[in-house]
Image (spheres, helix red, strand yellow):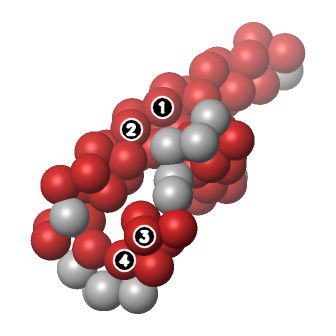
């Protein structure tokens, strides 16, 4: 579920136009997040907001049980 939340943030970034073709092509580098400052920021955003999204969902589930 956490991975899905992370990827939902990447989808949001893509919809907002934050991922351009050169960025997507750079993903073929296994160290893209280390070698590309912009993609590092994109990843950090996805980890942060994805984890928060997952946490909020998890809290709702706890409150509903």
Q: Which residue is mark 4?
A: 26
Q: Distance from label 1 to label 2 (Cα)?
A: 6 Å
Give above or below for 35 relative to 18.
below
Ranked by sequence position, the earlier of labels 4 and 2 is 4
Q: Residues within 10 Å of mark 1 (few under 14, many from 20)?
A: some
* Mark-to-mark CA distance, 4 and 2: 17 Å
Q: Nearer the viewer, mark 4 or mark 2?
A: 4
Q: Which x, y percent locates residue 48?
A: 39, 35
Q: Nearer the viewer, mark 3 or mark 4?
A: 3
Whichever of labels 3 and 1 marks the residue nearer the N terminus, that label is: 3
Q: Which residue is mark 3?
A: 22
Task: Report helix, strand or loop for mark 3.
Answer: helix
Q: Position of residue 28 (x, y in %)?
A: 41, 87
Point out which mark residue 49 bears: 1
What separation in Å lies between label 3 and label 4 (alpha carbons)? 6 Å
Q: Is residue 53 above or below residue 50?
A: above
């Amino acid at each position: 579920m956490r991975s899905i939340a992370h990827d939902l943030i990447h989808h949001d970034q893509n919809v907002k136009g934050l991922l351009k073709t050169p960025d997507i092509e750079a993903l073929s580098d296994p160290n893209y997040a280390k070698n590309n400052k912009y993609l590092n920021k994109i990843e950090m955003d996805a980890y942060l907001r994805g984890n928060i999204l997952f946490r909020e969902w998890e809290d709702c589930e706890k409150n509903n049980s």
